[in-house]
Image (tube, rainbow, N blue to C red):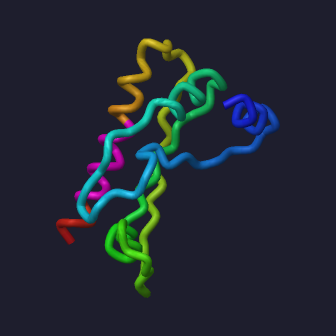
Amino acid sequence: MQRAREIVDEGFSFGVFVEGTRALPGELLPFKKGAFHLAMQTKVAIVPVAIKKTDTLMPKRVSLAYAGEIEVVIMPPIETVGKTMGQIGELLLQTRTAIANELLVNEST
C-alpha cells in the first residue's frame, strides 16, 4: 500500500482488480476494500471500469484463451474528496453497482 501511495503521489494512476481473482462466467465477486482505502487516503477519484466478455474468452479454471473481442467501458469517476473513511462501504457499493449494471447491459444484448 505504501508503494501504491507513492505512485499516486508521483502523479500516476493504476488499475486494481478489486474482486481479487477471476470470476466464473456471469458472476461478479465481492469487492475487496483495499483499493477503496487507498483512494480515500490519497483523495483520488475511483473510476469504475467494466471489462466485458473476458469471463467466456479467458475462463477461470481453464488454461486456454479463446479468440474474440472484449469491450472495456470506462465510467464516470466517483469522487472521494469530502468523503469520510466511514463511507468506504458506500463508495464500494456505488462502484460495484455501476459495474454490475454495465455488465448486465452486456447480457441483455
Which residues fall within the magenta stretch?
A: 95-104
> Is residue 66 covered in magenta?
no
Seen at 30% across and 41% down, the residue is 97
Q: Where is residue 91 in the image (x, y as percent from the top left)?
A: 41, 28
34 relative to 53 in the view: left or right: right
Q: How many labels does the image show?
A: 0
Seen at 46% across and 64% down, the residue is 72
Q: Where is residue 71 in the image (x, y as percent from the top left)?
A: 42, 70
Q: Is 43 above or below relative to 50? A: above
Q: Quadrant of the N terminus?
A: top right
61 relative to 5 in the view: left or right: left
33 relative to 4 in the view: left or right: left
Q: Is 82 above or below relative to 102? A: above
Q: Where is residue 48 in the image (x, y as percent from the top left)?
A: 46, 46
Nearest the eye: 4 or 69: 4
**Dominant secondary-structure state across the stretch colored magenta:** helix
Give the residue at the far right of this rendering: 10
Q: Position of residue 57 (x, y in %)?
A: 38, 77
Nearest the eye: 58 or 6: 58
Nearest the eye: 42 or 6: 6
Q: Quadrant of the C terminus?
A: bottom left
24 relative to 4 in the view: left or right: left
Q: Is 59 above or below relative to 101? A: below
Give the residue at the far bottom of this rendering: 67
Seen at 57% across and 23% down, the residue is 40
Q: Is 94 above or below relative to 89? A: below
Seen at 43% across and 77% down, the residue is 63
Q: Which quadrant would residue 26 be assigned to in this image? A: bottom left
